[in-house]
Amino acid sequence: MIRRDARIGILFALPWILGFLIFMTYPLIASLISSFTNFSILRPPKGIGVQNYVELFHDEVFYKSLSNTLLYVVGAVPLTTVCAILLALLLNTKVKGMSIYRTLFFLPTLVPMVALGTLFLWVFNGDYGLFKQAFLKVGVTPPGWLTDPTWSKWTLILISMWGCGQAMVIYLAGLQDVPVSLYEAAELDGAKSFAKTIHVTLPMISPVILFNVVMSIIGSLQVFAVPYVMFPGGAPARSAYFYTSYLYDNAFQYQRMGYASAMGWVLFLITLSLTLIALKLSEKHVHYESN
Amino acid sequence: MSQVAKTSRSHRRDKQFTKILAHIALVSLSVLFVIPLLWMLSTSLKPIGETLTNPPRWIPSHLLWSNYPDAISFNSKELGYIPLLVYARNTIIVTILSVGGAVLSNSVVAYSFARLKWPGRDLFFGVTLATMMIPFPVVMVPTFALFKWLGWVGTFKPLWVPAFFASAFSIFLLRQFYKTIPMELSEAAKIDGCSEFRIFTDIIVPLSRPALMVIALFTFMGSWNDFLGPLIYLVDQNTFTLSLGLQAYQSQHGGTPFNLLMAASFLVILPVMIVFFLAQKVFIQGIATSGLK
């Protein structure tokens, strides 16, 4: 009987067991192996030891794309997180028309990346862009959002904030789960709105914050489509050339799939370590309910 | 007594004040969020001359609806013919197959993780969750090589076949939902002689429509908006999806008039927005539950 149950259980899980083996385990192992070869689609792979990794350490473009990506993560993750939490807190004040505001903030996240890139090329356009006009109106000459190497990344970081609606919805759900009794207790102790936010609200939603921050780090490390559309080749001066852009180019433009695989594994290790650091740093600050 | 009344009155005034402040903040912020979209819409309805004005013109002198048909049958010397309708058909094919595959596969797999017992189940579920941390670029190259070996590069198959093998995120989301259905329902049906498959199709699936809808919506959005997949696997322009086609539309700088480009972009966004407005409640709830452990 028990064995029969187990058979049925595994039968139901079969699509994912196969998916896990074919689309996760196999590619993960295969990319590790091919990272030690000079594999390309054109010729059979030949083992070359750690040569790909050695080359990575001396590759200036690799460092450029890596530092661009890390800077993007450092800029985009905190900004979108703060933006999403602030919006959620505002919406949680139980104002009238909450669902309308929620829709308006969420709307941008529905825009496909390519359309998003195209739209912002137009918004940041150096001659006729909306942004330029807004700056000139208040008497400030705007930087070259799309043409100045020091600004191109910040343009992308700004754009990433436009998509904070998705995290906002998750925070909002978390906020609505905070028991009212906690606020009442704080009020009895004479806490004002700000104090309540700091001492009750934020600790109560800290697991949600952690979850969102980790997902946001993992996502930002893979930034690809918007810069690909807005900055072909990572122009200007490769300032908007990101890790996945370089990995993609190695695999599909330069036919260096072994090298791309090595880059993939380095990205995997970076993702893992950043996630672990986030988990470790948050240990003392994240509050889980005791049950 | 009067002291209490006074504090409660000042407290109420305090609350009123906070609400007004919140409204002001929300109105100005939502304007910031919506302006780019309105700008897109406004540009898409302008004659080309009015897209290039200083200061920018918000309301076109007349609404040039013909930009939309022009964008659909775009043909120019520099860019050639851009078959937007063919892209749309391709996208619809890929999206429908992906949504069907994701709903079918995730519903059975999540059922197994939530309500069936087998050795190693919980350990495997943990591993499944951990796979969400694997960045796509890591598995990108061998997956491409696999599809190349199968002779599928250049076809739609790499874009929809994987959907039939479930995904960690959807499994997680559906499992949460299945767990809220009382076990007694299954047990009663079992006593009545129902097979596990009958319990699944006749009891669990009808009860899970909202959750399955969320999976369908997420897959729809992911598939409609996917860029990297089509970029890697599609070769011939006639097989391009909308997001890839749109990119081809603007790749030659200065080649495309911005009003037509914005019209085309708006057409790509429109279906997603319509679906969102039709299913707004389910959508928001689905995203909300997915974030909470």
Image: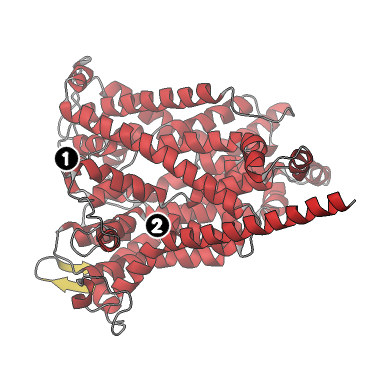
Reading the image, the residue beneath label 2 is: B224
Reading the image, the residue beneath label 1 is: A253
Look at the image and tell me in which quarter the C terminus of chain A lies. Answer: top right
Q: Which mark is residue A41?
A: none
Q: Residue furthest left?
A: B77
**Chain for disc number 2:** B
Measured from the top left, where is residue A10 in percent x and y? 60, 33
**Chain for disc number 1:** A
Query: Secondary structure beneath disc 1?
Result: helix
The disc labelled 2 sits on which kind of residue?
Trp
Measured from the top left, where is residue B84 in percent x and y? 27, 68
* Structural distance between the alpha carbons of marks 2 and 1: 25 Å
Q: Residues within 10 Å of mark 2 (few under 14, many from 20)?
A: many
Q: Residues within 10 Å of mark 1 (few under 14, many from 20)?
A: few
Viewer-proximal residue among A106 and B34: B34
Viewer-proximal residue among B75 and A239: A239
Q: Residue furthest right?
A: B1
